[in-house]
Image: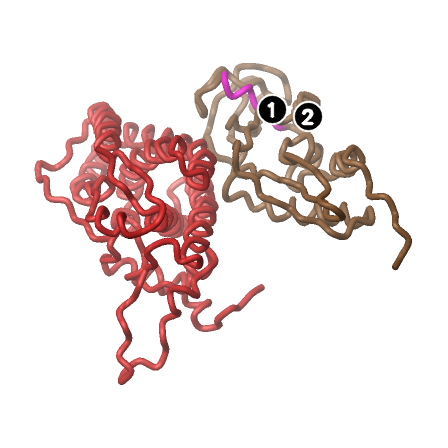
Amino acid sequence: MSAVVANPSIEQIWQILDQVPDPEIPVISLVELGVIRSICWREDTLVIAVSPTYSGCPATSMINLDIETALRANGIEAIELQRQLSPPWTSDWISKGAHEKLRRFGIAPPSRSSQTDGASAAPIACPHCGSFDTRLVSAFGSTPCKASHVCNACLEPFEHFKCI
Amino acid sequence: MPTLVPLHDLALHMGDNCLILGQRLSQWCGHAPILEEDIAQANIALDLIGQTQYWLELAGALGAQGNGAVATEPEPEQSHRQVQAPEPARLKSADDLAFLRDASGFRNALLVELPNGDYAQTIMRQYLFDAWHYPMLEMLRDCNEHQVSQIAGKAVKEVAYHLKRSTDLVIALGDGSEESHRRMQAALDKLWMYSGELFAADGDQETARRSGVQIPIDYGALKTSWDVHVGDSFQRAGLRPPDSNYMQQGGRRGIHTEHLGYILAQMQFLQRAYPRAQW
């Protein structure tokens, strides 16, 4: 038998996963996205519960692959990823720090869900020029999580991370 | 008085609605009248096909355990059939259910298999469905069966966006130009008789008592909620449903229109011609 090496701590696993970027929005990590729900060791198997953002989001399988890749690169071999549907992921779980990163990346961050009724809501600030003189073009955009807007002030189109 | 729906039947019904409607909407990809609508249709189709996975995984797991009434197909006659349809018990995964069932095994409402027609027909079909889908998911989210409530709790938030869009479009197109109004009214005249099936209890009670877990569905409350929403939208849109009360049914018993056959022929061809193909 090989020498027994201590399993990384839960805190270390969180740090590893905080280095894994979202495949579509690489400026934020999976931890900042709020999709990593729990991490625990079951004997020598690392069990991680992950929530899908949108039901049909094609990035979901990429996210799972990236989690496994990152963990294996850190020497963890026995991994079990569980899909957790309940409670459902909400954009409220995107960390505060991530909001500014989204804005700088050109995506208007989500408002708190409690403030909106979904697609219609208070005006969204343009991530390019900061003006609130913006309008919704469509509640659907380039990915399931984003809506399309246009700024009337600087005339740039931009996307908004939808509240869900 | 709620109707008891067997869990397996419910999972198939919900999953098949999403699968077939998702396929229909995907046919618009690259062909919608404006770019933003092309993107919206594709996103909604994606949401629905994602939800299909959850529902059909549940149905597959229940079928494999023998915990529910399994969709059966008529026995093939040996004389002119060389290929046997897969035994129902072997349909375990969501993929198996999607790609290996024949039309008689599907439990979707007839409404979602109807042709896209012109854009008005597509939008009217979407709205009649969304106005049912949203309160249905709210009801299922609050039910006691955990597997159902967690799927519904996830799906209901996405469907809220679907309903908002289709409502706005029905009103904008109904109360639009002479042409858009005419097309929307024609679409309503055509599709109205397929709306009743969404609320039909449809002989569930006998099989319900014989099967395992049953989910209580208050179709009366669902219909009331739908009537209010649809009545309000049509009033704003200047649209009027036909006077006839005749409602076409059959989808939930596997008796489908000829349209489903064409959809499945296109969707299933690859898996049936090259079984277990993967890429």
User: How many numbered circles does the render carry?
Assistant: 2
Q: Secondary structure at mark 2?
A: helix
User: Which label number is shown at residue A109?
Assistant: 1
Question: Mark 1–mark 2 contact, CB under 8 Å?
Answer: yes
Task: Residue B152 in the image: state x and y as whole percent.
Answer: 42, 37
Task: Residue A134 in the image: state x and y as whole percent.
Answer: 52, 19
Q: Residue B144 or B181: which is nearer the viewer?
A: B144
Tell me the quarter of the picture where residue B180 sits. Answer: top left
Range covered by the magenta-colored residues: A107-114
Q: Secondary structure at mark 1?
A: loop
Residue that badge 2 annotates: A98
Colour assignment, chain A: brown
Crowding near pointer 2: few (<14 within 10 Å), some, many (20+)? some
Crowding near pointer 1: few (<14 within 10 Å), some, many (20+)? many
Would you place residue A124 above or below residue A72 in this image? above
Quadrant housing the C terminus of chain B: bottom right
Left or right of B241 in this view: A43: right
Residue type at the position of mark 1? Pro
Distance from disc 1 to disc 2, alpha carbons, whole Å, reads 8 Å
